Image (cartoon, rainbow, N blue to C red):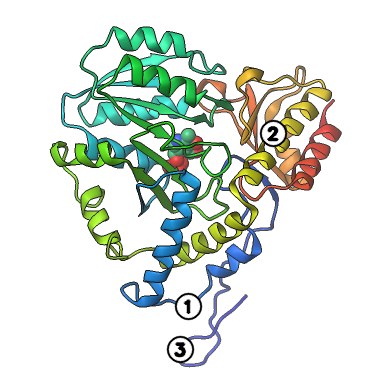
Amino acid sequence: MSTTLPNGTPAQTELPHAPTPVNLRIPGPTPVPPEVAAAGAWPMINHRGPEFEAIVTRVTDNLRYFFQTEHDVLVFPGSGSAGWEVAIVNLFSPGDAVAVITIGNFGERFALVANTFGLKVTKIPFEWGQAADPAAVGEWLRALPGLRGVLLTHNETSTGVTNDLPALTQVIHQAAPGALVVVDAVSSLGCIDLPMDALDLDVVFTGSQKGWRCPPGLMMIAFGPRGLAAADSAKLPRFFWDVKRAKKAFDKLAPPYTPPVSLWYQLDVALAMMRQEGRAAIIARHAAIGDYTRQRVQSMGLTLFADPAHASNTVTAVNAPSGQELKPLMKALRVEDGVVFAGGQDHLEGKIFRIGHLGAVQQPDITAALDALERRLK
Ligand SMILES: Cc1ncc(COP(=O)(O)O)c(C=O)c1O
């Protein structure tokens, strides 16, 4: 595509153009439906005017429905990683003792952020591919008196494992009753059941490019009453990520910064579509597609990396086929079939690949991707 200069003469250079569409089967960013994509091209508005206030009202109402909370859900510009930081700087003070339950790469990063901010971090680690064992977590926590917080990942995207959140939160509330419970739900919320209030969680966060069928760029975070109260005494410095400042502004239906208006349009449309489908139907769709994916890869003779009892309904981690190099296989799928899977992270690089099936995914998307994979297996 070319364009014209303001004086009407044709510009010399070609404008960058869109990449060729592919069957993008990574665990985020996820494909954006046409209705959501189109909203990204809507005209700019005054972000302190009535149209934006209406968007904030709809978006926060719909987010409360999906977080299953009556408390505050705030939206920040940023990716899922911002959730770790917003939670930590608003809840804690330097030297506070926290436990981080880690079952993979993202749990490790959560612990790293807590360390970076000077918290006294105890990791409760489990083997990658396994879920956290609630009984073992209980034992760890009972041996750690004075914890200010317990941080955990709902769905570990690097290993394709979903923690048993109801069992874990029950044990945390019993074994560490004073601790704030913070849940990274970046790759689960909007896809896998997560009743924030029923589980009595203090902070839960997610990212727009995962289950929400939007481009990356927005981080949505809910604070329960204990979380907000903790922000009154938390001493870690913060400005942009200050939840009290954000809440004050959102209570007046205007974020305390210039919002990425186009992303808000897109989230508004995406949430309206999701609300039409309904929470239970979305959760059931992910469960059915997750089941199908696991059965199908196993029927090809491949093996699952994750413990099947806790395999995720948003991402499936598959061991590399024996006798076949992963890199050329992934390349052939990408270049010749237009199917893109994600690789393994950290020490799992070259050992596993991951199939994303979250967001607006429908059965035919996954069937087509798995058909291509099957054809390329030797
Ligand atoms: C569970 C989990 N937490 C945190 C993150 C970090 O999110 P982002 O890459 O959007 O910063 C991710 C990203 O994949 C994730 O899957």
> Dot 1: within a 10 Å radius of its alpha carbon, few (fewer than 14), some, or many (20 or more) residues?
few
Judge left or right: residue 306 versus residue 375.
left
**Number of the label disc, if any, that sits on residue 290:** 2
The residue under label 2 is which amino acid type?
Gly
Give whichever of 300, 190 is nearer the camera.
190
Residue 95, compared with residue 219, is above or below; it is: above
Residue 356: percent from left, percent from top:
64, 38
> Dot 2: within a 10 Å radius of its alpha carbon, few (fewer than 14), some, or many (20 or more) residues?
many
Q: Could you tell me which residue is drawn at 80 percent across and 29 percent down? A: 296
The residue under label 3 is which amino acid type?
Pro
Q: Could you tell me which residue is drawn at 51 percent across and 92 percent down? A: 8
Residue 120: percent from left, percent from top:
22, 20
The tag earlier along the polypeptide, 2 or 1, is: 1
**Number of the label disc, if any, that sits on residue 43:** 1
**Number of the label disc, if any, that sits on residue 6:** 3
Q: What whole-number distance in Å separates the C-alpha atoms at marks 3 and 2?
A: 51 Å
